[in-house]
Image (cartoon, coloured by chain):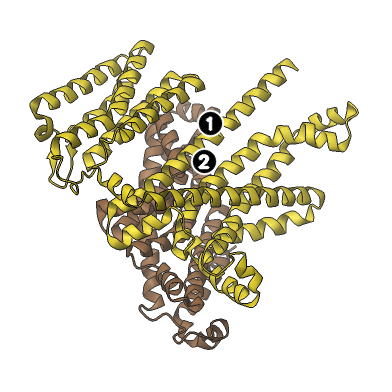
Chain colours: A brown, B yellow
Amino acid sequence: MSGVHRLRTPLAWALLLVTLMLLMPQLEGVFRLIAPDNRTLIYQRDSFASLVVNHLMLVGVASLCAIVVGMGAAILVTRQWGRDFLPLVGQLASIGQTFPPVAVLALAVPVLGFGSTPTIVALVLYGLLPIVRNTLVGIQGINPGVMESARGMGMSGRQILWQVELPLARPVILAGIRTSVTINIATAAIGSTIGARTLGDPIIAGIVNGNTAFILQGALLIALLALCVDSLFERLQLR
Amino acid sequence: MVLAATVALGLPLVSVQPNRIMPGEGLTLWSLGGPLALAAVLLLLAALAWLAWRPTRRALTLSLVLVGLCLALLPWALVAVAAEQLEPGMTSARIGLGAGWWALLFVLLLALLELLNRLALAPLLRWGLTLALALSLFAALMSGGLDSLALMREYHGRSAAFHAALRYHLLLVAAVVGVSLLLAATLALAMRRWSGLRRGTFSVLSVLQTIPSLALFGLLLAPLAYLAARFTWLGDLGIRGIGWAPAFIALVAYSLLPMTRNAYVALDEVASEVTDAARGMGMSPGQVFWQVRLPLALPVMLEGIRITAVQAIGLAAVAALIGAGGLGTFIFQGLGQAAMDLVLLGALPIILIALLVDGLFSALAEQLRRAQGRGDAHG
C-alpha cells in the first residue's frame, strides 16, 4: 500500500473538518432548521479556523509534554537503578486517573491564573496517566528471553532501550498516547470555562444563550477533530 | 537498593524546606514559629531520612508512624497558627492555605503511600490508619479552631447549600450508576444471546464516548426543552431542558460503554470448564447463571462499576454548567467570581469522593477475589 492510500481515512476526516470549518457560515440555512428562533445562527466571536488551530495547539503542546514526561518517567523506573520507584509511579498514575478533569482544571487556576496555561497544565496531568501506564505495561510485557539475548549479544543499556524495548513496546505505547490525545481533545473544551480559547467557546456561548446552533457547531468540530486524530493513530498503530 | 530507597524517601522530603504558609502575607515557617519551629521540622525530616537510609522493616514501621503523626498533626498545626495569628476580634480575617502547605501535604501523602507499599500492611490496618487520619482532621474541624480558614469561611457562608449540593451530587451519581448497571446488564445478556448485536452496540457506545461531555450536555438541552414544552406531564416530572434531566441522560450514555464492556467481558470470561462442570453436576441453566457464572463474574463487574462511578462523579461536576446543580456549582461560581476558596469548596469534596469510591470498590473487588481464591483452594 502506498503512503497516501494508507492515510485515506484520516485525510477524509481532515478534509471534512477543514471544509466544515471554512464553510460553516454558508450552512446558515441548515442551522435555521435546527434553531429557528435564534437571531444569529453562526458563532461569530471568533473564526472557526482560529478556534480549531488554537484547540489543536493546546492539545498538541499538552500531549507533547505528557509524552515526554510520561514516557520518560516510565522508562526511568524500568531501568535497573530506578526500579525502586516503580510501585510508586504506577500507583500515582492510577490514583491520578481518579481525579476528575474539572477539579484539576479548577485547582490549576489559583496557581496559574486564567487562560491557556492552566488548561495546558491540567491537560498534561490528565494525559500523563494513560501514557505512563501503557509504557510501563509495554516495556514490562517484553519477553525476558528477548532481553536476555539482547544483553547476550553485547548490547549496551542504551542500545537495548532504543533498538529492543521501545520498538517492541511501540504498539502498546501508541495505544496509550492515542487514548491520552483523544481524551484531551474532548477535555480541552472544558478549558473554555477558565478562559482558554478553544472549540468549547461556541458550546458555552450556546448553553448560556440557549442557542443550539452554536452548541452543534462546536460539538461537530470537536467530534471531527477527535475522529481525525483517532483514525490517524489507528493507521500509525497498524504499521 | 539501599541507596535508591533512600532517594525514594529522602529526596522528596528534603524539598519541603521552603516551607511557607499563608501567601496572603507570605508567612514562612521561620516567621511563624521562629528558629525553634524550623529546627523541629528539619529534625523531623532528618530523622525520616535517617530511617530511610536503612530500610529495615522496623525503620520503615517507625517512619510510617512518624509520617502518620505528621499528617494527623497537620490540621492541628493550622489550628495553632490560626489561634496565634488572628486576634479574637477580627471576625472577617481568614487564613488561606499556601503553596508550602499543599506541598507538605503532597510529600507526606507520597511518603505514606510509599511506606504502605513497602510494608504491605494488612487491609484492616490500612483502613484503620486512614480512619485515624480522617478522625484527626474531623476533630480539628469540630474544635472550631479552623473556622478562620478561608475555606471554612466559604463553607459557613453557605453550609445549607453545600449540604444540599453534596446530597444532590451523590444522588445523581448513585442514580446514574444504578440505571446504567441495569441497562448494561440487560445489554450484556442480550449480546450473549444474539451475538450479532455485539459489534453494533459497542461501536455505537464508543462513538458516544468521543462526544465531549460539554457538547453532549448542550445538545440535550434543546430536545428536552422541546419535549417538556410539548408534553406538560414531562415538565411536571421535572424534566426540562435545564436541570437534572440532560445531565442524567448524558451521564448514563457515558457510563454505558465501560459498564457494558465489563459486564460482557466478565460474563464471557468465566471458563467454560467451570460452567460445564456445573451443568454436569445437574444444575439447571438458571442455576448455572445465578450460582456459578454471576458470582465468578462479579469482581470484573465491580471494576466496571468503579470506573463508571468515578467518571460520573467528575462529569456530574461539568453538568453544573447546564444548571444540574451539585458540587460543580461552587466550582463555576468560584471561577466566575475569581474566589478560589469557593472553587476549592467544590473541587476538594469531588476529589475526595472520587478517591473514596475508588478505594472502596477496589477493596471490595479485592476482597471478593480473595474469597473466591480461598474457595478454590478448599474446593
Q: Is residue B240 left or right of residue B35?
A: right
Residue type, mark 1 in image = Val
What element does badge 2 sit on? helix
Report which residue position mark 2 lands on: A168
Indicate whether A188 appears above or below A129.
below
Residue A74 is drawn in which quadrant?
A: top left
Indicate whether A127 appears above or below B107.
below
Residue under the point 36% across and 15% down? B61
Chain for numbered disc 2: A
Residue type, mark 2 in image = Leu
Q: Depth check: B13 or B89 in front?
A: B89
Q: Is residue B302 left or right of residue A178?
A: right
Indicate whether B233 appears above or below A22.
above
Residue under the point 67% across and 55% down? B202
Residue under the point 29% across and 21% down? B6
Residue A155 is drawn in which quadrant?
A: top left
What element does badge 1 sit on? helix
Q: Which of marks 1 and 2 is nearer the N terminus?
A: 1
